[in-house]
Amino acid sequence: MFISYRQSDGSPQADSIESLLRAAGLVVWRDRTDLRPGTTTDRLEQALTTGLSAAVLVVTPEIVHSDIIRERELPRLLQLDEDPAFSLCIANKIARAGSNTQCDYEAPDRLLRLAPSRTLADKKQSNMLQPSGESEIVRDLLMHRVEQRKSAIRSENRAFTIRVQTRPAPFAMDAGEDDLHIRIRSAGDGRLPSREGLTLLQTTLPLISDAVYAADAKAVRVSGGAHLSVALALGAALPETKIGNVEVVDAHGALWTSTEAGDDPLTSELHTQPVDLEQADTCDSHDRIAIFISLTAAPDRTAFEQLLHESSDRFAAAAVVSVVGEDRLDPREAARLSAAAAQQIKALAARSGRAEVHLAFHGPYTMALLVGRYLNTLRTVVYEWDGATPGRPRYTPALVLEPGVTGGPITQVLLGQ
């Protein structure tokens, strides 16, 4: 995806659109990060003639002064847009006279000296003066991406592929063969994801979920790596009720799948142990329970116990769900153990009257994603482990998952509040 904009007043809007598109799984080319050394016009021409599938034209008042957009970028984008396989979106930030919320759909042609022609006025424009404008562009480009990939997915009888990454900085050269490549901006320091990244994901996950469903693929295959809160949220966006089979590829290439294949070695089992809270039960605690899921041998409960003792609000109950068996999980056990873990979470919540679940998860991101698929009936506060303070590891609330409500699965970002 190519973003065309006037740097003097269009950079903030271009930055915002870029971040949302990356969080939605679309690869973006930006001049400031992807323009390699050399003559600017030559490198720009390479970008405009190699591998583009879509573009966003950001229209701001000072675009009238941009010779590069008017004489080089726009003519090429209009030429590409004659092909149905290409999609040109117009992000209009020019206010109509006398209005702060309605945009002037005639302005792009006028500012770019195309008038009296209605070259751009007759195309779909998204109103950037409204909060929904950016989401509209992301949705349109996601569906365009799916439309372009759908025939290949069907003919090859393959899974819809998603690569996710929440740590390294994104570049256009990341583009691969995956159908979507979700990239959210990493935090400046420490182990935690960035609040901004989680907020972007809150906006894009419903759109991603709808796009994946529209692809009508036999399965969804996820690869890469992510913070556990992001993995749980992505799983919640691909629920068992909507997506039949989800496969997750780990760093060693092993496949962890949500559907049992009949080769489960049955070497691991889950054990649930209630935790004595040693605190008075109050009316305020009845709708909150804390659960620590650890899918590694000999789990360290220090940070979870600290969460229980230091929480400003009381919990009605708490439990540790841990694995018993081999030191390492076998990927072939993933379907059984992820379903069992989710069943334990739901059962514990039901015993306290469908209580809000405060979930601290410790284990492979592959399992976090698969467990997240089953959280569709719960309100879950998801925590991230933070070891920033030596000797005092703690769990920090990251986000709230409510997959069954409008705008879910992420309904609130808690990190950084």
Image (cartoon, helix red, strand yellow):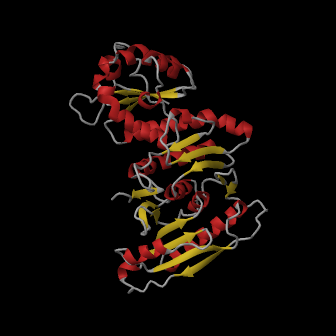
In the image as oriented, which residue stretches furthest toward the front?
390
Quadrant (top left, top right, bottom left, bottom right) of the C terminus: bottom left
Residue 129: x %, y % from top left:
31, 36
| Location of residue 131 with respect to 347 vertically, above or below | above
Residue 267: x %, y % from top left:
74, 70
| Location of residue 205 with respect to 81 vertically, above or below | below
In the image as oriented, which residue stretches furthest toward the left?
98
Q: Residue at x 55, y 41 (%)?
A: 181
Question: Can residue 81 be seen?
Answer: no
| Location of residue 322 with respect to 150 vertically, above or below | below
Figure quadrant of residue 308: bottom left
In the image as oriented, which residue stretches furthest toward the right?
263
Query: Of residues 167 and 317, which is closer to you in this image?
Result: 167
Residue 139: x %, y % from top left:
48, 39
Horizontal placement of 365 versus 352: left or right?
A: right
Question: Can residue 71 be seen?
Answer: yes
Query: Of residues 275 and 409, which is closer to you in this image?
Result: 275
